Image (tube, helix red, strand yellow):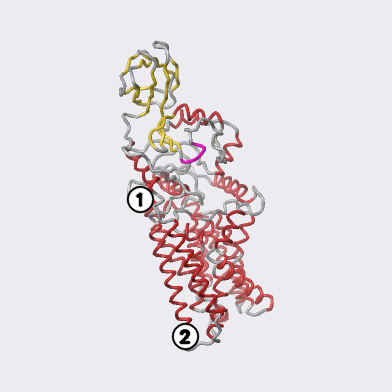
Amino acid sequence: MSQIRHILSHTPTGLGQIPKPLMLLERGVKAIIVAMIVLGLHRVFIANINWDEFYFLSLVHLYQNGDLTAPLQTIHVHLFGWLPLVSDNEIHQIFAARVFMWCLSLGSCWMIYDISRKFCSREAALFPVLFYLGFSYVADHVLSFRADPLCAFLFLASLHLLLGKDRSRIHMVISAIFMSAAIMVSIKSIFYLATIGPVLLTLSLMEPVKRGAELRGFVFIIAGVLASFVLFQWHSSTLTNATATEAGAAMMSAGSKTLLSGPFFPQAYFIVRALAENGIIWLFIFSGLWKAGHDAWRGDNRHRSLILLSFALPLLSLVIYRNAFPYFFVFLMPAVVILGGISADLLITRLRQSASRIPAAIFGGTLMLISASLVTSHFKKLPDQTIAQREVVAAIHGMYGEPVPYLDRNSMMSSFPKAGFYMSGWGMENYRARKSAIMEDLMRREQPRFLIANSCALNISMASNTSDATCQHRLLDRDFHILRANFVHHWGPIYVIGKTFDIGVPGVPQSFQIFVSGIYTLEAAAPVSIDGVVYQPGDRVRLDQAPHNIAATGGPTRAELRLGDRLYKPNTPPTAEPLYYRF
């Protein structure tokens, strides 16, 4: 054990009085990190809420309503069960969840720093934290309410215990539990095993007493398997009709779709952007990676170098992982950036030992570039990007006092029961592959009251399903026309169940079909006859799921039936801002 502590402890060379440039450097890095943390807290309340944040929240409400059946990647519902107590408004609930993620990010940053301290000096260990928070994709998504920040925290907690001074069996057990919890939060956490496995193996090889090392490794593996089993069984027992068979099938399907369904580097565009936007950070990381590889090849403190090399292995997931979108880098980078600290440590050592201005110039340029990127990005995204989302959520809560079924892409009204499937890119691909229209049956069965056009596929204001050439995932033509014929525009992107009629010859009825039963409000310029009964404009009409007919009582007129008893509609027009912003 003492040998491991020696290998994983870093003693900077040239100790003594700290040079003034080094003191200024340390203060500058700390100041930028603090600024990033403070600005991040501000971004919690103005950054556009991505569609999968609403979906992540909807799982919490599904669980609390007793409707959650999927045990995989839903264990977070227990951690966030308090969110509905914060507010009835989904926007406020997500803000509260983001503040929680902000607190987690503080813990993640501390663990990145403390792990880095095992490999480099105090000053250099600040740089991995700077690089993590300063990485463009991480800065944008580290506080998002999704699995990635939570998985990153759990992975770092597991790694931190593995590399700790006291590697007792109880620490191995706790580390394994953290890793199992990360996998329960998201299956993609298996990518972390590319680091955890080699670290565990290398630490075992470093032990002078092989039997003790093997035993600790065995304890970690057994504890991890048992923790995964216990967490899965416990979580499943709290759900409705959850089965291991269905969970296994879902896991196989997810693995096939996300790992084996596309070419190498399926998200090459976002990878290239990550390289271009964070060039100086990658330069430090790859320099540290080269140093670790060089030391391992030469045999200089090989065990330490092998551990450092393992920190980069999760990067290989970019070769095959379909969902390597910008938010994935929050998950991907926590250990990778530690390699940047190795490069920083080499420059700091040179700065300590000589009067060379080159290291100072490199550090100065790095801090200026990261600071400029931070300021530019923050001011570029400074306007509140949640205005449209706030308006829509408030309008729907004003329309309906209690949750009612609805249609949308991603469960934006997370506390309401969503009808239909989760319309992600993956979901839409599966839907299109089946080539079977579903909307008429879905409307009859689930009785949705309104629709949010928060996807181009649901933009039923278009005359045709192919009007928007940029829409990558469209509904089948029959489904599009079913929705277009059975919803009327209400406000902004909100449509409600209804029918529109252009009635011609008086007394000649038009037949129509109602899929969703309820009280409808008549909107017309003149009285009309519905099923032989004359109704005045503004009257309420009870219509059941059946065929009906409507006719004019005077001259030609336009009439509209809208489901609801004089539904609330905001007095002001909606903002021109989009509901969702692109990555």
* Amino acid type of the residue that numbered disc 1 sits on in the rendered structure: His
Q: Residue at x 56, y 40 (%)?
A: 473
Residue 272: percent from left, percent from top: 60, 58
Q: Is residue 99 above or below residue 550?
A: below
Does residue 378 show up magenta in the picture?
no
* Mark toward the viewer: 2 or 1: 2
Viewport quadrant of the N terminus: bottom right
Quarter occupied by residue 507: top left
Q: Position of residue 107 (x, y in %)?
A: 43, 66
**In the current view of this chain or complex, which residue is farthest to the right?**
297
| Position of residue 196 in the picture relative to residue 29 (left or right) | right
Which comes before the other along the chain, label 2 or label 1?
2
Q: Which residues are magenta?
A: 454-458
Q: Is residue 517 visible?
A: yes
Q: Which label belongs to residue 92?
A: 1
Q: Locate residue 236, reporting x and y percent.
A: 48, 48
Which residue in the structure is indicated by mark 2?
18
The answer to whether residue 219 of the structure is visible from this angle is: no
Q: Residues within 10 Å of mark 2 (few under 14, many from 20)?
A: few
